[in-house]
Structure formats: structure tokens, C-alpha cells
Image: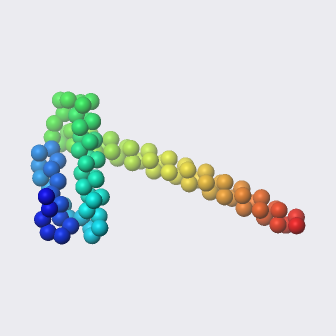
Amino acid sequence: MSYGPGVKVVSILGEDYSIKAPAGEEQTLLDAALMLKAALAETKKKYPTLIGDRLLVLAAMNLCSQQIEMQKRHKQELDRYQEQVSATVEVISKTINQA
């Protein structure tokens, strides 16, 4: 359901939220809501007695920790690629200087 341009209504834990997405980002908003719902369901499976805010906070903390781990892995990959590029540039430079 949507109201006005860019405004989407998402239901989280039985509450409806009207959220305006930037132009062209409506699908990202809906995907984020689905991701949060999946995280809530997964957290609820692990901790069936949690409800409301406690469930929401724990699910959000799990999502944040996953994001941090992805950022660390991304940085490590970028660093590794930078090292490879630097090594390749060094080899090319030596080859050019020997020619």
C-alpha cells in the first residue's frame, strides 16, 4: 500500500509505518523492510519469549553486527587488491626501467 509519491506503508511487529523513500529508492525501502522482518523472525525463533521493543532491538543489533562484519571484510578485500595493484605496478616499473 502507498500514500503519495515515494511514501510506502510497512508493517513491522503489527504496527504500520508510513515512510517516504527518496525518489527511485522505494524498492530499497521495501527490501529493507523485508530484511528487517526476516531478522525479526530469525531472532524470534532463537528467543521465543522476546516481544516488542526487546525483540526489535536484538534483531537490529544482529543486523548491525552483520553490517560491521561485511564492512570489515570489504576493507580487507580492498586492502588486498590495493597490495596486488601496487605489486603489479612495481613489477611493470622495474620492467620499464630495465628496458
**In the rendered view, would you say 27 is above or below 71?**
below
User: Residue 59 versus residue 39: which sits nearer the camera?
Assistant: 39
54 vs 14, left or right, is right
| Residue 29 image-quadrant placement | bottom left
Q: Is residue 90 left or right of residue 58?
A: right
Residue 49 visible? yes
Pick the residue in front: 1 or 19. 1
Quadrant showing the N terminus: bottom left
79 left or right of 92 in image: left
Name the residue at 27% across, 30% down. 46
**Vertical relation: 64 (above or below) 42:** below
Residue 49, image x, y percentages: 17, 29
Q: Position of residue 38 (x, y in %)?
A: 26, 42
| Residue 92 place in picture, x, y as percent | 77, 62
Which quadrant of the structure image shows residue 83?
A: bottom right
Mark count: 0
Residue sitting at 11 percent across and 49 percent down?
A: 15
Which image quadrant: the C terminus?
bottom right
As drawn, is 34 to the left or to the right of 90? left
* Colour convention: rainbow
Can see residue 57? no
What x and y, as percent, mark residue 98?
A: 88, 64
Q: Residue at x 26, y 35 (%)?
A: 43
Q: Please name the residue shown 48% across and 48% down the image.
A: 72
